Amino acid sequence: MLQVGNLSFNYGKTCVLKDIDLNVKKGEIISVLGPNGVGKTTLLKCLLGMIKPCSGFIKMDDDMDILKMSPTHRARLIGYVPQAFPSKFPMTVFDTVLMGRKPYVRFVPSDKDLEVVAKVLISMNLNHLGLKDFDRISGGQKQKVLIARAIAQEPDYLVLDEPSSNLDVRHQLEVMDMLKKLAQKKNIGIIMAMHSLNLASRFSDRIVMLKSGCIICNGTPLEVMTPKIIEMVYKIEVNINRINGYPYTIPLNPVEPVEFSV
């Protein structure tokens, strides 16, 4: 289990996260929701060790302190999928995924590293793209390749920042379904920042709702996705329908309409 306790973070004098308590179990998917600027990405950066919290702890199953690990050790345990991967020079899909083996490579990739990448590409149905230029594949394919790169790290946990952003509806569903299967088949704990309430409802085991840097609620989609909670967090009125067992949010009107003139 990945444990976060009493975690707080400030940018200067501005409090961004306050007293965050959160557990991520292997095999489950947790979506972190909330309006822009509430601290979703900051929380992910703390989990990855990219920034150091002002207080609190982040620990693994055997009480290992994430914040005291070397970057290499941490990268073997936690994989990261960013919103985008800026490529500065031509790189094949195979080589992009091979970058996920960096925590294990000393000088040159070993036969095992190459084998791991090949197996990941096959298991994720990406092997036909192996020799293609990463910059020349579609947005949906790029996102899958970035997930494959993180899986090549053989992590226990996966952190994703808006995995469905900039994707059309079909690729959103494909990427989210891929993550669901990875969590179940490889027993990987997944935590991701999300904007889409309905994708989070459909594919998450638990939803963590942030407001003003604090966790407002933490529970199953049916427990969290209610008109009262969504109105409190997003300041909008909604209807909630249940489709195939999960809550589907239909936005209605802002609680406080914005006035503007043309």
Image: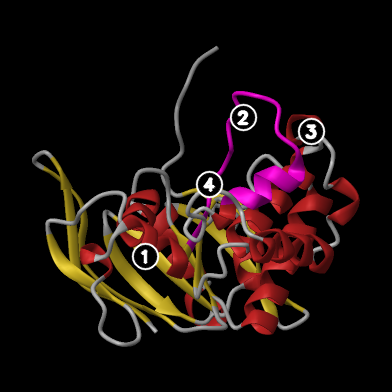
Identify whether 95 is placed above or below 110: above
- N-terminal of the pair, mark 2 or mark 4, is 4
Residue 1, picture quadrant: bottom left
Q: Residue 87, labelled with which disc?
A: 2
Give the crowd class for mark 4: few <14, some 14-19, many >=20 residues within 10 Å: some
Q: Amino acid at mark 3?
A: Asp
Query: Is residue 28 highlighted in magenta?
Result: no
Residue at image x 51%, y 53%? 102
Residue at image x 37%, y 65%? 73
Magenta extent: 79-99
Q: Residue 20, labelled with which disc?
A: none
Q: CA distance from mark 2 to mark 3?
A: 10 Å
Q: Nearer the viewer, mark 2 or mark 4?
A: 2
| Spot occupied by residue 90 in the image (x, y as percentages of width and height) | 70, 27
Q: Amino acid at mark 4?
A: Pro
Q: Residue 73, labelled with which disc?
A: 1
Q: Which residue is mark 3?
A: 133
Secondary element at tag 3? loop
Q: CA distance from mark 3 to mark 4?
A: 19 Å
